[in-house]
Structures are given as structure tokens and as C-alpha cells.
Image (tube, rainbow, N blue to C red):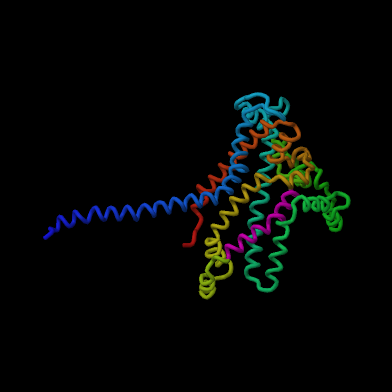
Amino acid sequence: MISKEAAAQDIKPKAKLLERTVVKPRSRRKAREAWTGLCYALPALALLLLFRYWPLLFGMWMSLWKWGYVPERFIGLDNYTRIFTEDLVVQDPTVGFQLGPVGQGFIVTIFYAIGTIPLTLLLSFFVAYVLFHITKGRTLLRVLFFLPYITSQVAAAIVFKWIFHPSVGLANWAVRYMGGTPQQWLTDPDPIMIKLLQSLGGHWPSSIPTVFAGPTWALGVIILFSIWSSLGFQIVVFLSGLTQIPHDLTESARIDGARTWHTIRYITLPLLSPTWFLLLIVSVIGAFESFNAFYVFSGGEGGPLGSTMSLPLYIFRSFYVYGQVGYASAVSMVLFVLLLGLTWLQLRYGEKKVHYMH
């Protein structure tokens, strides 16, 4: 008779052999599937590398050169030194410190972001909430609100320029009809705050640069246009988020006597926080990268007196108008780092207040 120990020793090699024969086909199958998936993803990865990461790396390399229309010589960090020592803040012997072109572009972009992001988010949420709860004409209204987003920004901006034309525009016609004074909407260089102080009999302190007096009428028109054109996209995203909220929660709250405001505050807004968070990040990036509206409304000049010279428009003019390719690349890298930092701050501190449904 065969002992138990001998039987066990005889079984172990057979088990190992069986395990090897099973594991090898499985590992080969997984490797084959991985390579197949990689082959399917290669076209998309190639496009991503070619049109996303390679321009970023090449822009970094160009920013280290004195580069006109052709590369001239390697200058290291001189372009960045120029940005932070000459073009961010400049010292005038008569009036003291003043903002340079990069500093002014940064302030204009900040004004634009402050003017567009909060208003667009609030308006889009309000419209989406109303559209979500109506029954008649819902589809038609959604299409009408979404149309500006898919309309060519350049064509729409030209129409807006005609609306705010000082002589034949509808805006001044409405102002005259209400008994007001027609405005030079796109050519008046005075900020709105200075005009308001002057109408009240005051004046702006001479020690403070006028760029801090807020946007001009021209920048206000650009802000209005941007809100109009981007509202539809955010409405659609908010509608998508509202459909994910369980109807039982809001219905139970109404049965318990909760008013509409309490339902929005304690149920809708917390459960929509991921949507708010997403749109906030996208809106901040979009505001700092906005170019089309600034270019069309100012004719590519950034006027009047640089009041619509955003950072992307300044980069464009440095690159294409003045031929300072290396310097424009350096400014774009500074803008990239700024956006990267803002996005990281939002992810680091904003996500703590986001409530995800499980």
C-alpha cells in the first residue's frame, strides 16, 4: 500500500504542472488583450502627444531663446527676467510704480474672470432649475438657450459690435429712448468706477493707477457677450446634474412642509456640488484663456488704452505682431503655471466641500 506522505508528494508535482499550464495561457491572454487595447488607443495617444504635449514642451524650449521669426541665440531665463522685472511693474519717475503690459493684461483678465464666472454660474443654475421644473415648451427653450453656445463667436461678436455702435447701435437708441446720454461703448477709455465717481462729484485718487478702477465699457461689453455665449453650455451641464438627484428626496421634503428655498438650499445645492465644482474649474480656465471676444471687439489692438488687452491677446500680439516668439512663449508658460496653480488650489481646498452621491 502507498502511504499518505508518498501520495501527497506524488500529487504536488502534478498540481504545480497543472497550475503552470493554467496560469501561462491566462497570462498570455491578458498580455495579448493589453497589447490589443494599446493598439486601439495608439491613434488617440499619438494625437494627444502631437497636439497637446509636444507644443507644451516645444513652447518651454522656445521660451529659453531669443527667437524672432527664426531662432537667434539661447538666452536661458532672460525672457522670464524681463517679464518680472520690466513688464509686470514699471517705475515711472513722475508717477511712481505703474503696471507694465503683462501686469495690465493680468488685471484685465482678473476683471474679466470676476465679471463672467459668478454671473454665468448663478444665471445658468437659475435658468436650468426653471427649465427642469416646467413641462410646456421645455425642449424649445433648451434649444434656444443652447444656440448661442454653438454659434460662431466671431460672427456673434460682430453683431454685438453693431448693437453697441455709438451712432447706429441699438444700445444707444435704447439709452436715448429712456432719456439718457449715449455712450462710446467700445472707445471710451475711462473705467466705469471713475465715470460713476465723476457723476457723483468725486474723483479718482491720483496715487492709485486707473487700471484698478474697474473695467471700461468696452470690457463690460465683452463680459456681457461672454455670459450670453457660454450660458447654454452651463445650463445643459446643470440640467444633467439635476436629473441625477433622486426625486424621492425632494418629494419627501415637500411632503414634510419644506419650502422651495429650503429644498434648494439643503437638498439641491449639496447634491449639485460636483456639478458646481466642475463648472467652476472649467470657467476659471476658460476665462484666463479667452481670446476670440477680446480680439474681435478691440480689432486685435486691446484698446481703448489697453483696457481690453487680456493676457492671451498680449501673447498673440507679442508673437504675431512684434515677432517676439521666445518672449511670447515665456508669457504663455507663466500663464500655464498660473492656471496650473489655480486649478491645484481649487482641487486642494474646493473638493472638500463637494458632496458625492454614493
Residue 337 screen position, x and y as percent:
58, 39
Q: Residue at x 61, y 35 (%)?
A: 58
Q: Residue at x 60, y 27 (%)?
A: 77
Quick check: 333 left or right of 21? Answer: right
Residue 175 screen position, x and y as percent:
83, 55
Residue 82 screen position, x and y as percent:
65, 28
Placement of 176 over or under 324, stated as above or below: below
Q: Residue at x 24, y 52 (%)?
A: 13
Quick check: 104 left or right of 35? Answer: right
Task: Say which quarter of the image contains residue 216.
Answer: top right
Placement of 312 over or under 248, stated as above or below: above
Placement of 333 over or under 146, stated as above or below: above
Task: Say which quarter of the image contains residue 139.
Answer: bottom right
Q: Is residue 302 magenta?
A: no
Q: Residue at x 54, y 58 (%)?
A: 273
Q: Where does the magenta region start and end?
A: 220-242
Secondary structure mainly formed by the magenta segment: helix
Quick check: 234 left or right of 190? Answer: left
Q: Nearer the viewer, residue 186 or 257?
A: 186
Q: Nearer the viewer, residue 61 or 233?
A: 61
Placement of 252 over or under 85, stated as above or below: below
